[in-house]
Amino acid sequence: MTYVRPHVRRDGTYVKGHNRRTRPRTAVPTVPRPRRAAPPRPRPVQYGPTTYVRPHVRGDGTYVRGHRRSIAPRDVAVVAGSGTGVLALVFLLLALVSGGGDDSKAPTGTSPSHSATAPAHQR
């Protein structure tokens, strides 16, 4: 491409500086090239637990898109501490419901039973 300096034409019109094609355009229309989509933006790496923040409008009128934010370690400890009590309660309820009573099919003793036809002791 050739650069054309700014100038004034004979009829008095001003032409700004610009780049001009060095070869003439062809009479055959060219087929536009398909546009490639922009590569996806890399997502920032989130370390530790995260939570989703729903889209909302702030008090000053600013719109905030939905996004993920990391949870502070102090908040994670509070959430984890409250979950262990619930988990222990679930295990306790499962143990009570399953019962493990006398109707189980597992053998109750490990010692062999004596048969009525065999002598218990020979001399």
Image (cartoon, rainbow, N blue to C red):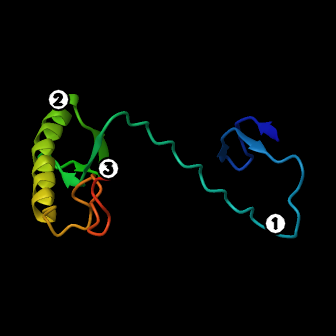
Which residue is at 87% across, 70% downward? 28
Looking at the image, is mark 2 or mark 3 nearer the viewer? 3
Question: Who comes first in sequence, dot 1 or dot 3?
Answer: 1
Residue 116, image quadrant:
bottom left
Q: How many marks?
A: 3
Give the CA distance from mark 2 to mark 3: 76 Å
| Label number found at residue 123 | 3
Quadrant of the frame with the N terminus: top right
SS type, badge 2: helix
Which residue is at 21% across, 67% downward? 104
| Label number found at residue 30 | 1
Q: Nearer the viewer, residue 26 or 35?
A: 35
Q: Position of residue 91 (x, y in %)?
A: 16, 52
| Label number found at residue 74 | 2
Q: Nearer the viewer, residue 79 or 67?
A: 79
Dot 3: within a 10 Å radius of its alpha carbon, few (fewer than 14), some, or many (20 or more) residues? few
